[in-house]
Image (tube, rainbow, N blue to C red):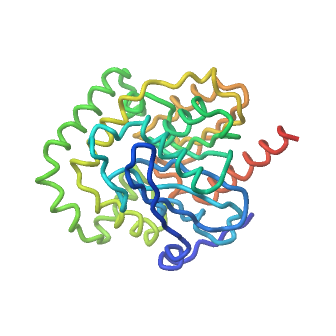
Amino acid sequence: MALTLESPPVLASRLRFSDIASADGTRIRVWTNDADGPVVLVCNGLGTSPYAWPAFLDPDCGIRVVSWNHRGVGGSDRPVDSSKVGIDEYVDDAIAVLDHAGADACVVVGWSFGVNTAFELAVRQPHRVHGLLAVAGVPGNTFGAMLEPLRMPRVVRRTISVNSARALRRSGPLVTPFTTRMPLTPWTLALRYSGFMFPRARPDVVRLALQEFLTTPIDWYMHLALEAARHPRVSLSAIDVPATFVAGRWDLVTGAREMATAAKRIPQATYVELRGGHFLPLERPETIHAELHALIRRVRARDN
């Protein structure tokens, strides 16, 4: 299916938002592209918005996406207990989103930290997950997969990543007033040349996604990351549905080798490696869209 990505204002207008209560009573902001097609649950990258998925905002994308904004982000409330922001709570939020959408089961997409949520959901509620698309993420021990292209031992990489997140959490109150007011100039958008993201991403779409992301206080974002990072590796032997792993060859956040290893442990999994970094939904939206449709066809073929 060919896609023509429209301008950011048009893409943004495709979204419909509503509020629901999760299992613990926390108010969650849910969103859908309101398109026609099979329901797909998106477990988004931590603290990111719908605008990170321009291909899914095309009205002719052929997929009805349902998703939500993480706790304390994008209109969702912070929980009364600030520790209730781990993968356990995100799985509860995902179930609440599916119930709200009237979806008994569907294919589930995860990106980055969202891969943890997607796979944990498949383990705990296997009857609700027909297939899994993992984009630039591994199912568990996320900080251990960071900085993999630097070829350092996993324990060293995890230590560096965790300590960096802790330092940013402590300095967040000082940094946030600058990040929330940061003008998105061509210099700011040089992120597309940083190694975390590559220049294939359209500048106008990146601007829309960054505008939303920068509204989150840095200390809260790092709190979310550190709590979610407590999630151990998922037992992949429990996964019995078609799965696709899509990795960025030069991804500094989730190493491609880590994803390839995970894919080999699932009998019905395929592995795809793209020339790109961590932000594949922005860098390679058409390819991610095509891989999702291919996964849906595999799920249907298996069920028939």
Q: Residue furthest right?
A: 304
Q: Residue furthest left?
A: 174
Nearer-the-camera pick, 17 or 183: 17
Residue drawn at x 22%, y 32% as measured from the top left:
163
Q: Position of residue 270 (x, y in %)?
A: 69, 35
Residue drawn at x 34%, y 67% as measured from the top left:
211
Nearer-the-camera pick, 249 or 266: 266
**Figure quadrant of the C terminus:** top right
Nearer-the-camera pick, 43 or 29: 29
Residue drawn at x 65%, y 36% as measured from the top left:
271
| 193 with respect to 183 (left or right) | right
Q: Is residue 195 visible?
A: no
Q: Position of residue 298 (x, y in %)?
A: 79, 42
Image quarter of residue 113:
top left
Q: Position of residue 169 (x, y in %)?
A: 19, 43
| 241 with respect to 89 (left or right) | right
Q: In this rendering, is residue 123 above or below 117?
A: above
Image quarter of residue 177:
bottom left
Residue drawn at x 51%, y 62% as measured from the top left:
31
Instruction: Please count the marks in the image.
Output: 0
Q: Position of residue 200 (x, y in %)?
A: 51, 60
**Figure quadrant of the N terminus:** bottom right
Image quarter of residue 289:
bottom right
Q: Is residue 29 visible?
A: yes
| 120 with respect to 296 (left or right) | left
